[in-house]
């Protein structure tokens, strides 16, 4: 991977219109995209030597793409759309662009949105989500 500043990994949320317009959740400072492959154990003992050594065998199972992040909360319309989707248990479309790699687009199941604040600092938030259903993988911006 080419040396790329972390700020270029972007998360956008769709507006639900047709055609859908994606807007940057610009206050996200720290982001992590996790691609996880569930392993299915297909190991079987040998029919000719059932007491012999077992050799591991596996296949791919369920694949998940999850995303977490944190940042500064503001009163912007895009953060409000993300907040409302979590509160109303809807699945907004999101677009995650990993520079020089790929762009992932699909529905997001927002698992949590934590909003924190101390009296002498800014209001911040943390979130975690999983992409659900069909995920479109395209060329990165």
Image (cartoon, rainbow, N blue to C red):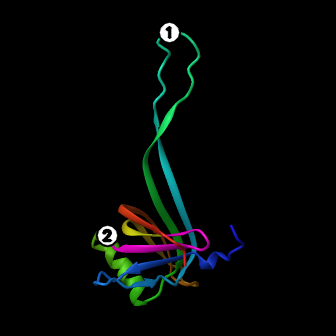
Left or right of residue 61, residue 16 in this image: left
Residue drawn at the location 54% of the way across and 74% of the way down: 140
Q: Which mark is residue 48?
A: 1
Instruction: Please provide percent x and percent y for residue 36.
Output: 50, 52
* Stretch in magenta: 91-103
Does residue 131 sit above or below 81 in this rendering? above
Residue corresponding to mark 2: 91
Instruction: Please provide percent x and percent y for residue 79.
Output: 42, 83
The residue closer to the viewer here, 52 or 15, is 52
The quadrant of the picture occupied by the N terminus is bottom right
| Residue 1 falls within the magenta-colored stretch | no
Query: How far separated are the C-alphas under marks 1 and 2?
Result: 52 Å
Residue drawn at the location 28% of the way across and 71% of the way down: 90
Q: Predominant secondary structure in magenta?
A: strand
The residue closer to the viewer here, 126 or 57, is 57
| Residue 100 falls within the magenta-colored stretch | yes
């Amino acid at each position: 991977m080419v040396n790329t500043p972390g700020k270029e990994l972007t998360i956008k949320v769709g507006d639900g219109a047709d055609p859908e317009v994606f807007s940057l959740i610009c206050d996200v400072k720290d982001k992590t995209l996790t691609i996880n492959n569930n392993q299915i154990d297909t190991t079987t003992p040998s029919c000719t030597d059932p007491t012999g050594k077992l050799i591991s065998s596996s296949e791919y199972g369920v694949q998940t793409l999850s995303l977490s992040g944190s940042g500064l909360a503001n009163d912007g319309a895009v953060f409000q759309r993300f907040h409302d989707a979590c509160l109303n248990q809807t699945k907004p479309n999101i677009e995650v662009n990993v520079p020089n790699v790929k762009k992932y687009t699909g529905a997001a199941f927002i698992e949590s949105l934590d909003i924190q604040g101390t009296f002498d600092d800014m209001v911040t938030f943390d979130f975690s989500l999983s992409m659900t259903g069909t995920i479109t993988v395209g060329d990165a911006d």
